[in-house]
Structures are given as structure tokens and as C-alpha cells.
Amino acid sequence: MKSGKIIVVGSSNMDMVVKTDHIPAPGETILSHSFFMNPGGKGANQAVAVSRLGGEVIFVSKLGNDLFGKQFSQLFANEGIGTGYVLFDENIPSGIAFITVDKSGENSIVVAPGANASLEKKDIALALKEIEQADIVLLQLEIPMDTVEYVVGYAAPGNAKVILNPAPASALSHERLSKIDILTPNETEAGIIAGMKVTDIDSAKRAAKAIVDLGVKTVVITLGSLGALICDKGKFTMKEAKKVDAVDTTAAGDVFSGALAVALAEGRGIESAVEFACAAAAISVTRNGAQSSVPKRKEVDSAMGI
């Protein structure tokens, strides 16, 4: 199925991952079972997901001119991602993420943004023509908020559908949210934006309604093993996740958002697109790492019985 053009604007980080029995409490020292490095960063993860799932993707990002930056540049080329707007900062290193994964697959992440924090409006200006002509523009919050708002300001008035994955979690104003077509928070992020705790489907519905009241057209709250809740045009729809044995939830939200963008760019409605995204995310949590966990299109189609 032919996909429209998808622009991903966001971060690239090298993930440094340790696996433990549990995530340590403040002041606690524990031993790790294993350590590995894996390319990550929410923007890069989503760009890889879009490409592997059959989408046409251009990535806008900034790397350090260092070993990790060179590795990323080669990786993006190998994945078939458009890299004409992936820039290099000569003075700041590439972003790094430190990730702890417990025995149930849950994770805790600390990010040192590095060059991601220097992706500025003047850098985005180089890609404005592509953004204006895109079908989908997908963003996250691991780059400066001013840059996110600048991209949305150009994308929203055109034909592009703007998808924001609001992670890391941050309170967002009515002014910021009113230009977003689809918001894809998890329970924590939805709770912070809505100003309430999200613990189950009922509280997720209340949070989704509150976020829509702030101006977002459609909210899709990812609920881990439960699936995803859609709030669209005043209607709630719950899409259940396939039951799997999770080993690492790192990047599951990124795979979900990338898959959602691909399905929408192919012309699917929101419910069908969320089903596709749930299937892709379910596969990703059965694998270790961020980009190493991203499935290919044939795997998702097979899981859906296509």
C-alpha cells in the first residue's frame, strides 16, 4: 500500500542499557545482569519504525560530530531514511540515554540530550518546504520546545496531519495543544497534561476528555498491555493489545507512534491505524533494545492475519 510522505523531527540518542531484577530506589546500588549499547532516541526510533513498516520518511535531527554521530548517519542510510536534514554540531556530543530494564520489561530512562538540545529554529528552516508538503509530521519532546512549536506552526496550517508524542512528559498549554491533530501519550504523560492520575481505563477516559477540551483533535492514550484508548470526535474506542511475554518495553511508544503515522499516511481511519500500531508495539516489547526491537512490515501484517 502506497504511503504518503512522513517527516519525523526529533532526537537521536545512543542508548546504554543495563538489565536488572528491579529498578533501583534512590540511594540503592544493585548489580546488572547485562549491559549493551543500542541506537535510540525517540525521533530516531520513530523514523526507523516508519521506514521498516513501509513509510516514506525524512528525518530532521542533529548529531554530534563524533563516533556515535557517524554511526547514526550510517544506520539511517542503511534503513532507507531520508537524511538530507540530519545535521552535525561540531561543539556538542551526540545525545546519550541511560536505561535500566527490570525483569518484567519495565524501564527507567535518563537522557543527556547533547546535540539534540541544539536543534534550533534556524536548522528547521532548511526543511520547511518538506514540512509544508508532508502528509504527516511526527514530533516528540526530546528537542527544544521552541523548535517543536516552530515546526507545528508551519505544518498545522497546511495539509499535514500533526502527531505529537508528548514524551518526556511535560505540561502543555492550550495554545500548544490546539494545533495538534493527534496526541499519543502514555498513562503518565496523559496524567501530567490533564492534571489527574491515570490508573485504569475509566481514568484514562477522563484524562482524554480533559485533553480534548484543551484543544487536541484526537487523543490516543497507550495503556501498555491493555492496549490503547482512542478519544475522537467525542467517541471513546478501546483497542486491545495482543497478549505477549514482554522482555523490554523500551521504544514501544515510539514504535506505536511510527506505526500510527504509517497507517494514517496510507489512508486508514484512526481505529484501523491504532490497531496496526498496537500490533507493531506488541512485537517490539518481545525484543531487547530500542531500534533493534522495531519490527518489519511483513511481521506486523502476519501478526494481524493479513
Image (cartoon, grey):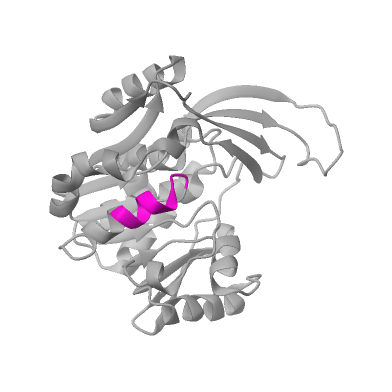
Q: Nearer the viewer, residue 298 or 166?
A: 166
Q: Residue 109, can we see it?
A: yes
Position of residue 65 measured from the top left corner of the image (x, y, whole percent):
39, 18
Q: Predominant secondary structure in magenta? A: helix
Q: Who's the residue at 76% across and 27% down the image?
A: 32
Give the residue at x 36% y 46%. Answer: 300
Nearer to me, 209 or 63: 63
- Locate residue 96: give its quadrant: top right
Question: Residue 301 location, x and y as percent?
Answer: 31, 48
Looking at this rendering, what residue extends furthest in the top direction? 67
Instruction: Name the image quarter holding residue 68.
Output: top left
Q: Position of residue 246 (x, y in %)?
A: 60, 45
**Of residues 173 and 166, the one drawn nearer to the viewer in this rendering:** 173
Residue 11 included in the magenta stretch of the image: no
Check the image and report above or below for 90 versus 140: above
Task: Tell me if I can see residue 55 in this picture.
Answer: no
Which span is picked out in magenta?
A: 142-150
Q: Residue 147: say if magenta.
A: yes
Residue depicted at 66% across the width and 72% down the height? 197
Which percent across, then down, holds residue 22? 78, 41
Q: Viewed as shown, does residue 161 lie left or right of 305?
A: left
